[in-house]
């Protein structure tokens, strides 16, 4: 058999489909080995195909004002979290290790400072007038084949992304059940800043910052997954809500916990979907992530990275 390299896995798949019609019993042992090799390659390709088609949208438009002087001249996601690597660069490295090829960043504050290669940028130039939900929808064209969205100001372990990716749901979010321990001695970031989640039979029933913490089951970690079907549901309902009279895209019209839809968080949109009868599942994680909102958070994340705990 001639030696030939095939870099296009779709081409390999077509070759495999053709040669397997010959049948193992009708060919030589050597040829059977080649068929088996093609079969293994195709199997691995099919297992990662959804990941390769699914994009990652990283929301990085905010100012990070609680870090004061640290973010005066640099967006928070670009702060160095370990030697030679920023928060967002570390996040992208983790995602690429899982097979994600299409990564999108929604930038706003000091957008020209983002110069990371091999990513696509969308600009939210009115980031002071809106919030995370609207920032996400600046990248709406990247949602079509399904996507994972994540906050740019957190560090995550590879295992967290993998667990969410593996979850067999059209819409799911990462939830930390042991969230209270993280808030012990977290003096600059009180518990009323946590995006808390109530769960029943594995599904989210409520999300809010304005609630009794003891009545909730975990904290939203800032990572969500939408398959192609889930993305279609999200997009359709976002535009329906935006154009409706009950939650008009304007000041003075509340949208769940937000003073307006334009000022909404992701959790407000998740609640809208739940109230409309769409299931959003909880994917439980156990630490392995740190949200960086304050100097205290920043130093804690650096410590965990140095110790190899994340």
Image (spheres, rainbow, N blue to C red):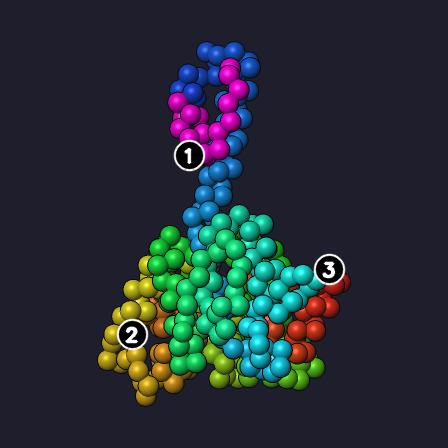
For label 1, count other residues whose C-alpha is less than 10 Å away and answer few (under 14), some (14-19) or many (20+).
Answer: few
CA gap between label 2 and label 3 equals: 44 Å
Q: Is residue 203 visible?
A: no
For label 2, count other residues whose C-alpha is less than 10 Å away and answer few (under 14), some (14-19) or many (20+).
Answer: some
Counting from the top left corner in percent of width and height, residue 193 is at 55, 81
Residue under the point 50% across and 81% down:
209
Residue 123 left/right relative to 292: left
Q: Compare residues 283 and 63 and report the one nearer the observer.
A: 63
Counting from the top left corner in percent of width and height, residue 188 is at 64, 84
Q: Compare residues 276 and 13 and report the one nearer the observer.
A: 13
Q: Is residue 16 visible?
A: yes
Disc ID at residue 142: none
Residue under the point 35% across and 59% down:
141
Residue 3 left/right relative to 54: right
Query: In the picture, residue 157 is in which quadrant?
Result: bottom right
Q: Which residues are magenta?
A: 1-18
Q: Which residue is mark 3?
A: 308
Q: Compare residues 46 and 219 and report the one nearer the observer.
A: 46
Q: Which residue is mark 2?
A: 242
Q: Which residue is mark 1?
A: 10
Judging from the image, what secondary structure is the residue with disc 2 in?
A: helix
Judging from the image, what secondary structure is the residue with disc 3 in?
A: loop
Q: Mark 2 vs mark 1: which is more N-terminal?
A: 1
Label 2 with label 1: CB-CB less than 8 Å: no
Q: Is residue 171 above or below residue 188?
A: above
Q: Mark 3 vs mark 1: which is more N-terminal?
A: 1
Residue 17 left/right relative to 75: left
Judging from the image, what secondary structure is the residue with disc 1 in?
A: helix
CA gap between label 3 and label 1 equals: 38 Å
């Amino acid at each position: 058999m001639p030696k030939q390299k095939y870099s296009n896995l779709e081409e390999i798949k077509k070759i495999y489909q053709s040669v397997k019609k010959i049948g193992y019993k009708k060919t030589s042992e050597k040829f059977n080995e080649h068929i088996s090799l093609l079969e293994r390659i195709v199997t691995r390709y099919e297992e990662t195909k959804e990941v390769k088609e699914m994009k990652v949208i990283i929301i990085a438009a905010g100012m990070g004002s609680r870090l004061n002087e640290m973010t005066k001249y640099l967006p928070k996601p670009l702060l160095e979290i370990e030697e030679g690597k920023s928060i967002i660069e570390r996040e992208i490295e983790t995602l690429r290790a899982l097979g994600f090829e299409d990564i999108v960043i929604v930038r706003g504050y000091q957008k020209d400072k983002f110069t990371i290669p091999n990513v696509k940028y969308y600009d939210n130039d009115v980031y002071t007038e809106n919030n995370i939900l609207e920032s996400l929808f600046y990248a709406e064209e990247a949602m079509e084949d399904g996507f994972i969205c994540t906050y740019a100001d957190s560090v995550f372990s590879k295992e967290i992304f993998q667990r969410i990716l593996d979850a067999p749901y059209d819409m799911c979010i990462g939830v930390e059940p042991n969230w209270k321990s993280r808030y012990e001695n977290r003096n600059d970031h009180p518990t009323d800043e946590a995006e808390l989640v109530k769960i029943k039979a594995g599904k989210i029933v409520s999300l809010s910052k304005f609630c009794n913490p003891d009545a909730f089951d975990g904290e939203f970690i800032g990572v969500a997954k939408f398959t192609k079907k889930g993305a279609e549901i999200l997009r359709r309902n976002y535009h329906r809500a935006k154009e409706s009279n009950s939650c008009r895209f304007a000041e003075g019209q509340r949208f769940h916990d937000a003073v307006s839809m334009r000022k909404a968080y992701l959790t407000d949109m998740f609640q809208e979907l739940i109230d409309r009868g769409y299931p959003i599942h909880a994917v439980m994680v156990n630490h392995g992530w740190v949200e960086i909102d304050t100097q205290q958070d920043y130093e804690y994340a650096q410590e965990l990275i140095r110790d190899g705990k994340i």
